[in-house]
């Protein structure tokens, strides 16, 4: 429904609030773009290929249960770090169950080929330590319950505040009431779907597509709300009414 003249709308807001809301939306918009870029740089590379795919989501949450992180690295990103026969020897050790009894033969290989990068200062796993190498040699079970709990609560608390303010600003727009209610509520629904999908994927990898839908859903709803809010705060078509 079109608001009547005495109703407070984005176009009739004082300049102070239009500048304030614009500042907030610009910074939050940048934050959302960075969040997208970060997903591409972390989860996007989980399957060793660029771009976010269903496999990335499965590997991040369910894990790559056909192998270990160490084997995945030796056949993927770290493949060129050591000669083929060293890679094969290391993979054999992984497949034998990473026994400590063979450590004397494995450790020198790791020290020679890997330690120059995987040292204490690097922040990378110190593969020349038996416990570290063994844990990397275990089957990759994806995200741990502890890390999922941590990321879930940060997401739910943090992002719901962003949607609250974005929705409050968009709530002042002149917009079809039905669609306004849909747009204001979808980000919250998709946020819950997104977080729920990580947990579902952890146990049932076939749920990974829900993560894609969740992310796409709230990006779309946010884009419509941002665009509408900016347009109605600054374009003469809406702001002119103030001076009529
Ligand atoms: C030239 C430096 C360099 C060398 C040499 C190197 N690595 Fe790496 N390694 C890295 C970097 C950087 C990363 C993180 C890259 C990323 O995740 O995209 C990494 C990641 C890994 C990971 C993944 C860790 C994780 O938690 O997922 C494993 C496993 C690994 N390396 C094993 C090895 C092994 C085994 C060797 C020796 C055969 C080796 N690396 C040699 C730089 C190196």
Image (tube, rainbow, N blue to C red):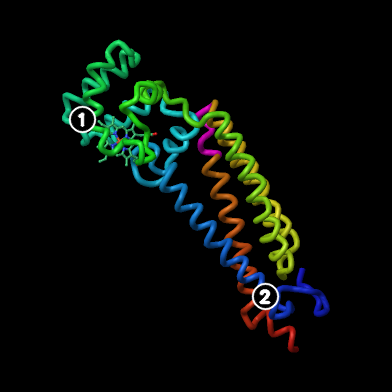
- Identify the mark at residue 18; answer none if there is no mark: 2
Quadrant assignment for the C terminus: bottom right
Which residue is located at x 25 percent, y 27 percent?
110
- Give me the C-alpha separation between circle 2 and circle 1: 61 Å
For label 2, the crowd category at 10 Å Cα-Cα, with few meaning under 14, some 14 to 19 and many 20 or more, is many
Label the magenta part by its dominant secondary structure.
helix
- Identify the mark at residue 155; answer none if there is no mark: none
Report which residue position mark 1 lands on.
Answer: 112
Residue furthest front as drawn:
120
Which mark is in front, 2 or 1?
Answer: 1
Q: Is residue 3 left or right of residue 98?
A: right
For label 1, the crowd category at 10 Å Cα-Cα, with few meaning under 14, some 14 to 19 and many 20 or more, is few
Q: Quadrant of residue 107?
A: top left
Front in this rendered view, residue 153 or 183: 153
Indicate the secondary structure of the residue bearing disc 2.
helix
Q: Where residue 99 appears, x then y in whole percent?
A: 33, 13
| 42 w.r.t. 73: above or below | below
Q: Magenta residues?
A: 204-210
Whether the residue under disc 1 has CB within 8 Å of ligand 1: no
Q: Earlier in the sequence, mark 2 or mark 1?
A: 2
Q: Where residue 239 appears, x then y in whole percent?
A: 68, 81
Which residue is located at x 43 percent, y 44 percent?
42
| 1 w.r.t. 190: above or below | below
């Amino acid at each position: 429904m079109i608001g009547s003249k005495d109703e407070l709308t984005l176009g009739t807001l004082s300049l102070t609030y239009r500048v304030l809301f614009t500042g907030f939306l610009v910074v939050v918009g940048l934050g959302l773009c960075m969040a997208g870029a970060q997903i591409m740089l972390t989860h996007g590379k989980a399957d060793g290929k660029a771009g976010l795919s269903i496999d990335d989501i499965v590997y991040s949450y369910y894990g790559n249960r056909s192998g270990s992180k160490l084997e995945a690295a030796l056949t993927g990103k770290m493949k060129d770090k050591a000669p083929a026969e060293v890679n094969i020897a290391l993979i054999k050790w992984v497949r034998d169950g990473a026994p400590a009894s063979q450590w004397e033969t494995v450790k020198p290989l790791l020290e020679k080929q890997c330690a120059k990068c995987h040292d204490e200062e690097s922040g990378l796993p110190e593969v020349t330590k038996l416990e570290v190498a063994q844990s990397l040699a275990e089957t990759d079970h994806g995200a741990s319950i502890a890390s999922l709990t941590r990321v879930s609560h940060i997401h739910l608390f943090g992002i719901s505040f962003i949607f609250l303010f974005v929705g409050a600003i968009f709530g002042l727009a002149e917009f079809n009431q039905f669609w306004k209610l849909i747009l204001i509520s979808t980000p919250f629904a998709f946020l819950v779907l997104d977080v729920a999908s990580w947990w579902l994927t952890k146990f049932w990898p076939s749920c990974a597509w829900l993560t894609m839908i969740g992310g796409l859903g709230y990006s779309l709803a946010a884009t419509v709300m941002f665009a509408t809010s900016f347009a109605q705060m600054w374009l003469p078509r809406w702001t002119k009414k103030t001076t009529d």
